[in-house]
Image: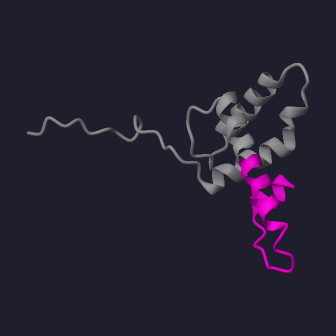
Amino acid sequence: MSDEVQPDADSSARKWWSDADDLNLLTQVSNDLPFNHAKNTAKAWDSVAAKLLQLPPFARSGLDEKMASTRFYHLLRAHKKFQESSKYLSGAAQDITGKIVLLH
């Protein structure tokens, strides 16, 4: 017998967001615009998280307003960085993904 403890599927939460989860988040944020709520921003992000958790294709569990807003702003920063670097590639072909469309 081995003394090692094997983690079960529920206890080992995924660290990485899938592209599908990112697209679901960006779509929901685009629909709800939680950053436009001056007074109840936390409640607005909580609503986004709750709606995402109700989606069958959304694979993450235990999502809360902090995780949703943090991931959104991470994607936004990465997109801004991409835009800054790609503005010097005039005439170069670029792949337009769903994330890029939703972040514009």
As drawn, 87 above or below 64: below
Magenta-tinted stretch? 75-104
Q: Is residue 89 left or right of residue 78?
A: right
Instruction: Answer whether residue 89 is magenta in the image.
Output: yes
Q: Position of residue 28 (x, y in %)?
A: 78, 43
Q: Which residue is the extreme one toward the top?
A: 39
Q: Is residue 103 magenta?
A: yes
**Residue 10 lies in what quarter of the image?**
top left
Q: Quadrant of the C terminus?
A: bottom right
> 41 left or right of 69?
right
- Give the camera-side residue of 15 and 27: 15
Q: Residue at x 86, y 80 (%)?
A: 91
Residue drawn where x is 80% and y is 42% of the image: 29
Corner quadrant of residue 101: bottom right
> x and y percent of residue 60 in the render?
57, 41
What secondary structure predominates along the stretch shown in magenta? Answer: helix
Q: Residue furthest front?
A: 88
Q: Residue at 70% of width from left, 29% of height from top?
A: 65
Q: Residue at x 75, y 72 (%)?
A: 95
Looking at the rendered image, the quarter that the N terminus falls into is top left
The color scheme shown is: one colour
* Residue 85, position as x, y percentages in the image: 77, 63
Counting every numbered tag in the picture gives: 0
Q: Give whichever of 34, 90 is nearer the camera.
A: 90
Eyeballing the image, is 20 above or below 1? below
Residue extending farthest to the left is 1
